[in-house]
Image (tube, rainbow, N blue to C red):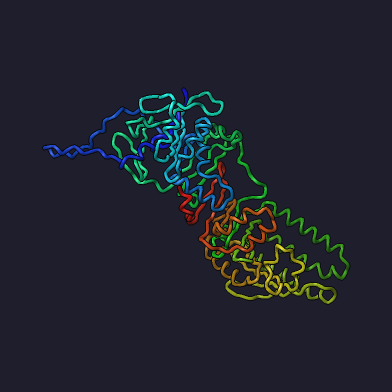
């Protein structure tokens, strides 16, 4: 059977929008028996039987506000194609390029786009502008059926004709499927009774099967991809494994992100995961340190041996969970997971104390920076490392982290509930780490995110982030990132790997976009 495409609203709305509104059936007066009034069935042609829609169609999509979705993406990313370009892409999958190019500018984005593949047919709904442009573009095409449809020539190389619903003159709203449109606000009528429900406020993006997906993406590696949510700010995504094709994965990512450490104030941007290669990296680092001590002279070895022992002990406490973040401006955050955070903190403090003592001794014989390490706060316990005179040794990208005196200042804390050690580097790290430790210690426990493969947070407005994404210089990107402040409520993304799928959630505030880009 030839496949058909019902471009319902795209080929109906141009005529129907001229109508003053949705017509509701008049009720029949009540009879003497007191029976309730009945709605009169509108006269008109009998419509074909509707398709039985599956809960899991081969492919389906519903986007309530497509222009706003594109505007939201455009706010952050450069060179996002305009809405007519996306409409042209959709139409070119169903019609010749010349016809698609004529229809695409007529498609609007302030009303829902929808489509589904069912019973061997593609049914696509695209709202269009009022006027005769759509009807003019379809003039001369062969009429099909009893409801005003015309047969579209096949797109690129495919001889199978497509059928698009087109409003027959004199019968506004007739289509080849049981979907019609009313005048604005957006309406859909399901015969026999017409109604005008308000537009849906959420988006559902669904489920390309391997067969359908490979028509667009020949190397589609999944069994199914499904997404549902209120928009880009609130979304759940499932990516299911295809039989015999394990999900793509990275050797550098494993379950165990420190998600709770990201749910804190002042954090402009951050990301967390667990690095499965941490044990080998730690072993290699300890091996290199021991080799360096062995090559040192007798006096140096006496000084370095205790330091290497302390460093090795602290490094082995790390369980591979790691977090990197920035914010407030000129402050870098580092989270390091530990199965026993208190013991890991104690070993790190001992290591740094030994290091500072050795630097003080070394200054008697060489020109090395001065350093201090002291306890500066309780509840939570915070230690502060200050290294003087390091400005000439720090690369340009790291200079924003130094204070006005050119000092490197590092604050350290730990929390068992947060699941590890917290480190802040910056000009004023003490108040930052105190607020971070308090919020992380009262927030989501680290054990709750043991199944999180990757988590990330962003609390930066598009106006500040977009220029960074446009730069091609890595050093400028790092410098710009270190200058970010949290200036909006955070958006949190969490990715989990299940036995047969990836599952991602996005939660955050709805982005305010330029209203001129919503249509």
Vertical placement of 272 versus 81: above or below?
A: below
Residue at 35% across, 46% down: 198
Vertical placement of 272 versus 65: above or below?
A: below
> Quarter of the image holding residue 450?
bottom right
Residue at 30% across, 27% down: 45
- Where residue 305 sits in the image (x, y, percent)? 80, 67
How many numbered callouts? Answer: 0
Please indicate whether residue 342 sits to the left or right of residue 151 in the image: right
Q: Nearer the viewer, residue 255 or 425?
A: 425
> Quarter of the image holding residue 421?
bottom right
Farthest right residue in view: 297
Please indicate whether residue 514 sits to the left or right of residue 366 in the image: left
Vertical placement of 352 versus 147: above or below?
A: below
Res 338 visible: no
Residue at 49% across, 52% down: 233
Q: Nearer the viewer, residue 32 or 451?
A: 32
Farthest left residue in view: 32
- Where residue 441 sits in the image (x, y, percent)? 55, 65
Q: Nearer the viewer, residue 409 or 302?
A: 409
- Where residue 154 sits in the image (x, y, percent)? 51, 26
Res 12 visible: yes
- Where residue 244 sits in the image (x, y, percent)? 60, 34
């Amino acid at each position: 059977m030839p496949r058909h495409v019902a471009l319902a609203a795209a080929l109906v709305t141009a005529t129907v929008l001229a109508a003053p509104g949705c017509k509701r059936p008049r009720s029949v007066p009540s009879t003497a028996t007191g029976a309730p009034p009945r709605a009169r069935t509108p006269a008109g042609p009998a419509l074909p039987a509707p398709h039985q829609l599956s809960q899991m169609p081969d492919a389906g999509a519903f986007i309530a506000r497509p222009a706003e979705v594109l505007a939201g993406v455009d706010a952050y990313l450069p060179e996002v194609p305009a809405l007519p370009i996306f409409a042209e892409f959709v139409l070119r999958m169903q019609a010749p390029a010349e016809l698609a190019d004529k229809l695409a500018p007529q498609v609007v984005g302030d009303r829902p786009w929808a489509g589904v593949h069912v019973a061997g047919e593609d049914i696509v709904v695209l709202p269009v502008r009022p006027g005769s442009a759509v009807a003019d573009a379809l003039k001369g095409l062969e009429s099909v059926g009893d409801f005003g449809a015309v047969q579209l020539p096949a797109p690129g190389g495919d001889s199978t004709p497509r059928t698009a619903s087109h409003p027959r003159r004199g019968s506004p709203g007739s289509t080849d499927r049981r979907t019609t449109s009313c005048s604005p606000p957006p309406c859909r009528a399901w015969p026999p009774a017409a109604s005008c429900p308000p537009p849906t406020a959420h988006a559902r993006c669904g489920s390309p099967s391997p067969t359908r997906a490979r028509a667009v993406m020949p190397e589609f590696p999944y069994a199914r991809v499904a997404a549902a949510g209120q928009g880009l700010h609130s979304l759940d995504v499932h990516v299911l494994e295809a039989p015999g094709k394990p999900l793509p994965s990275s050797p550098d990512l494993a379950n165990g992100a420190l998600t709770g450490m990201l749910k804190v104030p002042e954090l402009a941007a951050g990301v967390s995961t667990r690095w499965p290669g941490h044990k080998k990296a730690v072993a290699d680092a300890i091996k290199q340190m021991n080799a360096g001590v062995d090559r040192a002279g007798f006096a140096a070895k006496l000084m370095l041996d205790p330091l290497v022992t302390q460093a090795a002990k602290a490094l082995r406490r790390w369980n591979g969970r790691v977090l990197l973040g920035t914010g407030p401006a000129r402050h870098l955050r580092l989270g390091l997971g530990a199965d026993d955070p208190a013991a890991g903190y104690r070993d790190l403090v001992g290591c740094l104390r030994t290091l500072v003592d050795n630097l003080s001794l070394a200054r008697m014989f060489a020109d090395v920076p001065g350093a201090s390490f002291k306890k500066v706060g309780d509840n939570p316990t915070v230690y502060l490392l200050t290294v003087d005179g390091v400005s000439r040794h720090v690369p340009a990208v790291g200079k924003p982290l130094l204070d006005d005196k050119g000092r490197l200042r590092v604050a350290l804390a730990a929390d068992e509930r947060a699941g590890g050690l917290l480190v802040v580097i910056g000009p004023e790290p003490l108040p930052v780490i105190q607020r971070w430790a308090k919020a992380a210690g009262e927030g989501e426990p680290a054990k709750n995110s043991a199944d999180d493969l990757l988590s990330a947070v962003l609390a930066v407005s598009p106006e500040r982030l977009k220029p960074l994404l446009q730069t091609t210089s890595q050093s400028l990107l790092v410098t710009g990132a270190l200058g970010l402040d949290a200036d909006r409520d955070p958006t949190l993304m969490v990715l989990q790997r299940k036995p047969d799928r990836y599952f991602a959630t996005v939660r955050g505030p709805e982005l305010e976009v330029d209203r001129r880009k919503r249509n």
